């Protein structure tokens, strides 16, 4: 058995087998890179897209003439999304290490499998937070304050699945915080379009993370973990349809409030068709399909970004 084959065998079921983490990372870093989900970039993208939407939309709102505005902010937020998504995953796995050990899909994760110790995870979390702080200090004071409040969401989100059937709502608050931070980084304030973008992102997250939660609904029910998948059950299609309609309308209104042109609305309609595709394709009892549709939200985020960027440029 080759080194790569051995790593894949020991890796969690939901890892990306072709990831550079398995192929290139040194042995001492492998478990930690998995702990921060570097082998699964979808979470970073889902955290990053609201930041990028907001940066470009705010730049347009405030009259920027650059074709790709605020490139420095885009780079800082990209690195920050990778680091802070990793920190959030470490926090989540520290909270969930006992429950993860009881779930087939997660029992091979670094903490429940013993490949990373609890002490090592805390030290690694501190390092990620320091990097995140360094990035945050490159932004204006108002954005630093807004960013500091996100730590409350990052720490408390993993608790929600133990006390409410709506942990996906808390994830929505957390993962779309970048829509507020991106706007604040451009304008040193938060204006109505940013709030509309943030609200739309929350409903988007409610939709895609409910799809994701259907992968684990049987295990979650057995160990007492709550989710919207267990709350909605056979009515999932109806709920997700409602969430995605609200997402589309709120994004549409955010573009209108930012004085976007016709090309933005055309692009957003295309993005909206992707949401319709997800709902029509969804089979809540097909785990592989649920994961595929969840990951496809990266494409939706990209389509929205292109719509905003094209609306700004044209």
Image: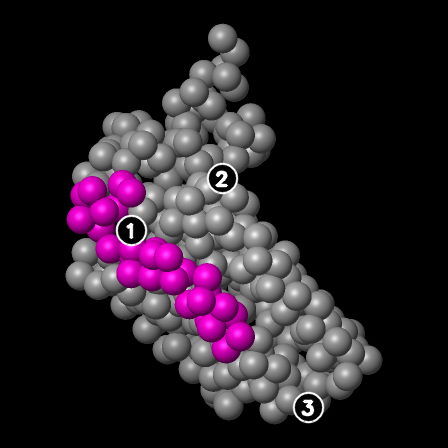
Q: Residue at x 44, y 54 (%)?
A: 211
Determine if residue 245 is in view.
yes
Q: How is the image coloured?
A: one colour
The part of the image, by quadrant, that contains residue 150 is bottom left
Q: Can you identify the residue that label 2 sits on?
A: 288
Relative to 181, say whether 128 is above or below: above
Residue corresponding to mark 3: 259
| Element class at badge 1 | helix
Between tags 1 and 3, which lies in front?
3
Q: What residue appears at the point 37 percent right and 51 percent down from the top-left corner?
A: 213
Is 231 located above or below residue 146 in the figure? above
Between circles 2 and 3, the one closer to the viewer is: 2
State the predominant SS element of the stretch in magenta. Answer: helix
- Span shown in magenta: 218-246
Q: Position of residue 264 (x, y in %)?
A: 72, 78
Give 276 or 147, whichever is nearer the viewer.
276
Measuring from the top left, give residue 129's x and y in whole percent.
36, 56
Mark 1, residue position? 91
Q: What residue lies at 73% left-to-right and 72% top-to-bottom?
A: 267
């Amino acid at each position: 058995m080759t080194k790569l084959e051995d790593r894949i065998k020991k890796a969690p079921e939901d890892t990306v087998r072709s990831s550079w983490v398995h192929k290139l990372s040194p042995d001492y870093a492998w478990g930690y890179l998995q702990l921060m989900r570097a082998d699964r970039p979808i979470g970073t993208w889902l955290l990053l897209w609201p930041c990028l939407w907001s940066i470009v939309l705010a730049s347009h709102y405030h009259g920027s003439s650059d074709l790709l505005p605020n490139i420095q902010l885009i780079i800082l937020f990209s690195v920050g999304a990778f680091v802070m998504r990793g920190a959030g995953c470490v926090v989540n796995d520290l909270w969930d290490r006992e429950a993860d050990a009881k779930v087939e899909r997660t029992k091979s994760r670094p903490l429940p499998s013993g490949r990373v110790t609890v002490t090592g995870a805390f030290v690694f979390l501190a390092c990620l937070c320091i990097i995140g702080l360094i990035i945050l200090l490159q932004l204006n004071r108002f954005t630093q304050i807004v960013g500091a409040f996100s730590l409350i969401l990052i720490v408390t989100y993993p608790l929600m699945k133990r006390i409410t059937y709506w942990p996906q709502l808390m994830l929505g608050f957390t993962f779309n915080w970048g829509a507020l931070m991106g706007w604040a980084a451009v304008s040193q304030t938060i204006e109505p379009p940013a709030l509309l973008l943030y609200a739309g992102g929350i409903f988007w997250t409610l939709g895609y993370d409910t799809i994701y939660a259907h992968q684990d609904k049987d295990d979650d029910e057995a160990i007492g973990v709550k989710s919207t998948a267990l709350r909605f059950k056979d009515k999932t299609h109806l709920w997700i349809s409602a969430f995605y309609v609200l997402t589309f309308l709120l994004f549409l209104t955010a573009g209108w409030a930012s004085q976007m042109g016709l090309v933005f609305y055309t692009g957003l309609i295309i993005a909206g068709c992707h949401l319709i595709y997800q709902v029509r394709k969804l089979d809540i009892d097909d785990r592989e399909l649920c994961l595929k549709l969840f990951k496809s939200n990266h494409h939706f985020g990209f389509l929205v970004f292109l719509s905003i960027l094209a609306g700004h440029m044209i």
